[in-house]
Image: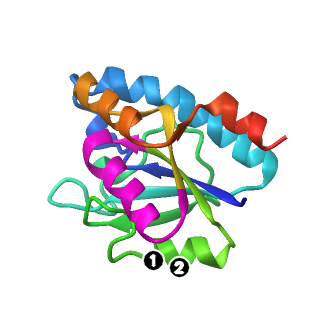
Amino acid sequence: MKPALLVVDMQNEFFADAAARPSLDAAVASINETIATFRRRGLPVVVVLDAEGPARLPGLAAFEPHASLALAGGDARVEKRHPDSFWRTPLDELLRGQGVDTVIVSGWCAEYCVLSTYRGARQRDYAAMILRRGIASGRRDRLDMVEDMCDGVTPGAFAALLT
């Protein structure tokens, strides 16, 4: 197994929404714990950024990943314009080029882009998992729905699998 962590749409614009903020802040803790595990193992972290105007365009502050994430300058960045992070992006080519066969999907918004990316990964024959407690939504019921319907792993269980 060679996994990659996908950090989907954890951008400044979404953190500015007071209703979304508690869910996003909670997800950051699990995402950062998992990023640390990936770093210790030399595994890829991929930051997926939703590029939709007028506010969320490259070069604008709203487009950038939130500063609370433990991202590094060497993390790959993929821009997307559709909910599925694989659709019409170089993500599949990037992952296959690194020998990745498993993706752990984290980020915002559970019922849209996270779920679409999870399904996109499965359609492309990746073993795909949702990072439990590492996804966010403005609605708790939808967050629970995605965690219930998708294969998932907690940060601790994932770290234990790699030992």
Which labelled disc corresponds to residue 144?
none
Direction from residue 110 to residue 152 in the image, left or right: right
Residue 109 in view here: no
What amino acid is found at the position of numbered circle 1 in the picture? Pro
Foreground of the two, 83 or 51: 83
Majority SS type along the magenta span? helix
Q: Name the residue carrying label 1.
A: 90
Residue 74 position in % (x across, y down): 65, 60
Q: Percent from the top left, x then y, of residue 4?
A: 62, 57
Q: Quadrant of the C terminus?
A: top right
Secondary structure, mark 2, is helix
Residue 36 lies in what quarter of the image?
Answer: top right
Q: Would you name the residue on which mark 2 appears?
A: 93
Q: Which residues are magenta?
A: 107-127
- Between 145 and 51, the residue placed more toward the observer is 145
In-front residue for pair 75/145: 145
Left or right: residue 42 versus residue 6 is right
Residue lying at 59% horizontally and 34% vertically, measured from the top left: 32
Q: Residue at x 68, y 32 (%)?
A: 157
